[in-house]
Amino acid sequence: MHFRFKTLFKLMICFALTSFAGPVHSASKSITPANQEQINGLFKTLGIIKLAGIAPPVDIELEDLNGKMIRVSDFKGKIVFINFWATWCPDCRFEMPLMEKLFQRFKDRDFVMVAVNLRESPKKVSAFFKKYKLSFTALLDRKGRTAFPFGIRSIPTTFILNQKGGLIGKILGPREWESEPATILFELLIKNRAS
């Protein structure tokens, strides 16, 4: 009886170790618990509302300043920063140069920044981008159709999408995107694959 119990116990230990080894091996590209804790802390520091990683309410498909159709779902595999804004908005004027600094830092990595302008002409948006020396992608939502499904009630409003295209963060109002917490956050998000 004692022998059977010892053998059964050993088999259970072996099974547990083999089961455990699988996830550890496959988690090399996933966000580790320690990194997730750090990301959660940075979300809190930056006042980012954590979202569950679900798909956006609609796939944004709009023209850029060159008349080219851009579809946000084509950026899967990258961290996507989507900002809803307008040229008349004082907070947007404050935030946009700081967004440019974040963009310059990560543009050669798996990172995309798009600014969805609501209800303004290409001429006005283009002049704004030249004035503020902005180089990230501006998308033109001339009729404001994307604002409603995304629940935009004020601008600027920003969303962060993970590499799977899921919404992981929502930010109401401007942020200092060139700050150390923002830089560390996007470094972690880009380096670590969302689970």
Image (tube, rainbow, N blue to C red):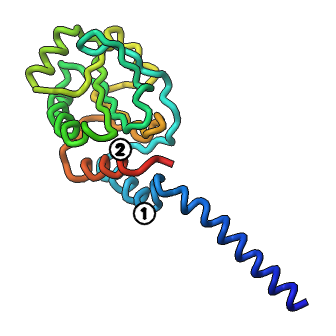
According to the picture, the residue beneath numbered tag 1 turns out to be 34
Evaluate if marks 1 and 2 touch, with contact meaning CB atoms under 8 Å apart: no
Q: Which mark is residue 48?
A: 2
> Where is residue 113 drawn, in percent x and y?
29, 31
119 to 19, vertically: above or below: above
Image point 19% across, 15% down: which residue? 125
Indicate the amino acid at tag 2: Ile
Image point 17% across, 11% down: which residue? 124
Determine the image quadrant of residue 142: top left
In the displayed structure, does residue 158 sit left or right of residue 4? Answer: left
101 to 193, vertically: above or below: above
Indicate the amino acid at tag 1: Ala
136 to 126, vertically: above or below: below
Q: Is residue 115 visible?
A: yes
Secondary structure category for the residue under label 2: loop
114 to 139, vertically: above or below: below
> Where is residue 189 drawn, in percent x and y?
37, 47
- Extreme residue toward the bottom, this view: 2
Of the two numbered discs 1 and 2 on the same chain, state the one appearing first in sequence. 1
- Extreme residue toward the right, this view: 1
Q: Quadrant of the N terminus?
A: bottom right
> Where is residue 109 drawn, in percent x and y?
29, 41
The CA span between labels 1 and 2 is 19 Å
> Where is residue 104 drawn, in percent x and y?
19, 38
